[in-house]
Image: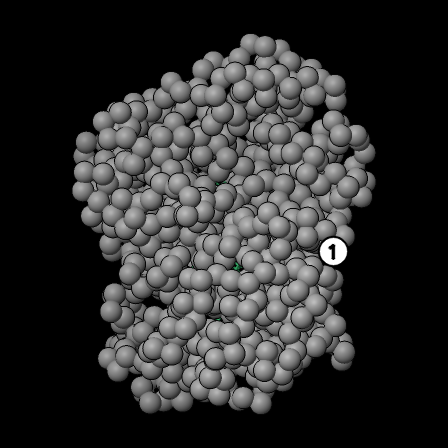
Amino acid sequence: MTTETSACILCSRNCGLELTIEDNKITKIKGDEAHPLTGGYICQKAARLGHYQHHADRLTHPLKRNAQGEFEAVSWDEALSDIARQLTTIRDQHGGKAFATAGGGGQGNHLGGAYLAQVRAAMKSRYNYNSLGQEKTGDFWVNGRLFGHQTCHTTEDVEHADFALFIGCNPYQAHGIPNARDTLKHLKKDPNRTVVVIDPRRTETAEHADIHLQLKPGTDAFLMSAMLAIILRDNLHNRDFIAQHCTGFEAVESVLRAVPIEDYVQRADVPLELVERVARGFATARSASVRIDLGIQHTLNTTLNGYLEKLLYLLTGQFGKQGGNNLHTFLAPILGHTDERGKVVRTVHHQMFPIAGIMPPNLLPDEILLAGEHRIRAMVIDSCNPMLTWPDTPRLEQAFRSLDLLVVTDVALTETARLAHYVLPASSQFEKWEFTGFNLDFPVNGFHLRHPVVKPTGDTLPEPEIYTRLIERMGVFPKPNRLLALLGKTAGSTVGLMAYMAATMATLARNKHLMPYAVSLMYRTLGPNMPNGSAAAAPLLAMCMDYGKRHAKAVAAAGIKGNRLTLGINLFKAILRARSGLIISRHEYADVWTLLRTPDRKVHLHIPEMLEELQALPAQRTQTDPDYPFILAAGERRAYNANQIFRDPAWRKVDREGSMRIHPDDAMTLNLADKDTVQCSSRGGQIRAVVQLDASMRRGTVSLPHGYGIRSQGNPPLGPEVNQLTRSADCDPFSKTPFHKFVPVKLEKAPAHV
Ligand SMILES: Nc1nc2c(c(=O)[nH]1)N[C@H]1C(S)=C(S)[C@@H](COP(=O)(O)OP(=O)(O)OC[C@H]3O[C@@H](n4cnc5c(=O)[nH]c(N)nc54)[C@H](O)[C@@H]3O)O[C@H]1N2
Ligand SMILES: Nc1nc2c(c(=O)[nH]1)N[C@H]1C(S)=C(S)[C@@H](COP(=O)(O)OP(=O)(O)OC[C@H]3O[C@@H](n4cnc5c(=O)[nH]c(N)nc54)[C@H](O)[C@@H]3O)O[C@H]1N2
Ligand code: SF4
Ligand SMILES: [Mo]
């Protein structure tokens, strides 16, 4: 029996864990008190992670679909050679546009994504479809315009805020903020601090609030612009802040001053007096911050919502300070910058541009099925289960089935893997070195490189090995450079690492064609000499050196020693040693201005595209479709769901059927009782669900959980397959992110026996 540290892989908080291992099995899980950011905090889901590690759908060897259409086990050699051959043929015949990847990392694993990106490079493809492209890209796009770069991601200092505004998020269940439940409890207990929740449901978070605005779904843009208009009308905007730190205020001001406040608040169907109190309270609080999530990102006006939410803290100067909203740093760059006004590779059919390097899942079926000669013909899907998580399941299935080559890399035989030509079995996140790029905190940021705590299952491999072998077989990546391999051997010392890195940079500068494969180059040359088999983490050296250079003062303030040349190297060594993660930087709040990427280091408030959308709002139809009179939120976060990370139905302690919440009065009009089966139809499809009467719902709305519909061991789906109901075309005109929280449906009582 041993005790090991790791982290939870179920949401972006990645709480530190202490695991008890017996006979290569995880037998006990608790919070790791030594974790510098989460300090022992966990929620009820983490203790169930044994169901992720050990279950009947785990893959144990590579699978190949044979001529009869059935899977047969093959060797890694055979699988990777076949795939490499087919991929290079497709690339040579049809070019880079014929290939795309999907996924590349979930809530706990981003290391493999860096290696997968090299397969895209080998295919000369720029098509990176990712789940972030169905939630956060609208936000990233706005960040690009406001702050000068799409990697300028913001965070909220809720723990220190006097006024915490939660719009369209339920951190009590979904987390996303530090130690969410403790933080909410503290906020609630403190009489000097105000919590406001804007959500159509009286959520568990709303139960912690002083004010709950239970708005009509899809009306956030109306409500937020009314709040902004009230702030301007009452002269509560921060003129000094705006003058000192922003440009383009006048254009924004003139549009916002024209907002018909009463009309907009009425559309949101919340009391005007309360909205005024919230707007004034937010603007005048000593510190205030806004936390948002899918409630505004999975509904109408996604991108505009992101803009308005940011204007709330920018116009009031609740930015760049304790308790406000702030920019933060990334050690591992999970976002890119792809400004569509410059040169970017667009999709063929929709001519859609990437945002932060990411393409939108909503358009994928069309880019496979409708793009003709230049369609996508081959895909590698990694750490993602689009057959359950991306919109419009039937059409996506049709698209996947039409591919010449579909490769799925996963730990489990998922619904998506079942459609593949090849399934590549990955070692689980407790069997390999892993990290996430979800270091989203400011001013104190941390990083956790996790080590393997159990031995790999069967013939599985970590993604770094899988994709390095694949690009080697594709012939784009040569045998390890001998000089680098030699220098890699001196990796034990700081001087050795300096020499190694200098030689690597020189090699890449001389051999530009190797540049896209720097990650595997480091893996193959430095990796073999890294301690405890941590080869896959070799590329972190480059990231740490870059981070040390850019944030020297903050890294030093975190206790890392070193000069201009050695600081990053020492950070790298400290990360390798720190089994519970470590603090990598301590910034000052005022440093936010150094993280801005606009040339003038000012926030550029004026985004013409958004002001245009704002001015077009009055024409938006907000009444419901009489044929589909209910608005379904298709994808609520609850106590026992966690994306598609668990497949073993036994992991859920409650709500195994994933019930549909409905207000008791609505249920009565439909003659529905608790536990009845309801038929739920949208314009896209229909499914059945079990009814749960719930007075926390707003009338006229219903809600189904995210993360169900799993066909464990090929059995019938368990719980609602919500994406049978969603349609690809129902998405934001700008970012193409789906309206999952705004699915018009009709409900009918179904016979109980089905
Ligand atoms: N338990 C659990 N936690 C998770 C996950 C999980 O699957 N399970 N998934 C993780 C992931 S990937 C993500 S992205 C986050 C998402 O985290 P959240 O976005 O916080 O979670 P949701 O429950 O999807 O949606 C938040 C709220 O939006 C509200 N809402 C619906 N329509 C509207 C609207 O029109 N306006 C407003 N203002 N609100 C609306 C819903 O009532 C809901 O309370 O959670 C993460 N954490
Ligand atoms: N209707 C509707 N649809 C939604 C949502 C919604 O609210 N409503 N939410 C959306 C959101 S916000 C998100 S983020 C997505 C999430 O959906 P996806 O992007 O599909 O991500 P996960 O559910 O996290 O899928 C993780 C997959 O990775 C596999 N996996 C786990 N560990 C490893 C590993 O180490 N290596 C590899 N290769 N694979 C691994 C798991 O077995 C699983 O198949 O769903 C989206 N879909
Ligand atoms: S699900 Fe999120 S909040 Fe809960 S333990 Fe895991 S990482 Fe922490
Ligand atoms: Mo997400």
For label 1, the residue is: 589
At horizontal 38% and vertical 65% (from top left) the residue drawn is 740
Q: Position of residue 145 (x, y in %)?
A: 51, 55
At horizontal 48% and vertical 67% (from top left) the residue drawn is 305
Q: Could you tell whether 268 is left or right of 311 in the image?
A: left
The colour scheme of the drawn protein is: one colour
What amino acid does circle 1 point to? Answer: Tyr
Question: Is label 1 within 8 A of ligand 3 (CB to nearest ligand atom)?
Answer: no
Q: Position of residue 620 (x, y in %)?
A: 35, 76
Q: Quadrant of residue 582?
A: top right
283 above or below 407? below
Q: Position of residue 280 (x, y in %)?
A: 65, 81
At horizontal 76% and vertical 78% (from top left) the residue drawn is 192
Observer-nearest residue: 602 or 739? 602
| Label 1: which secondary element | helix
Observer-nearest residue: 11 or 258? 258
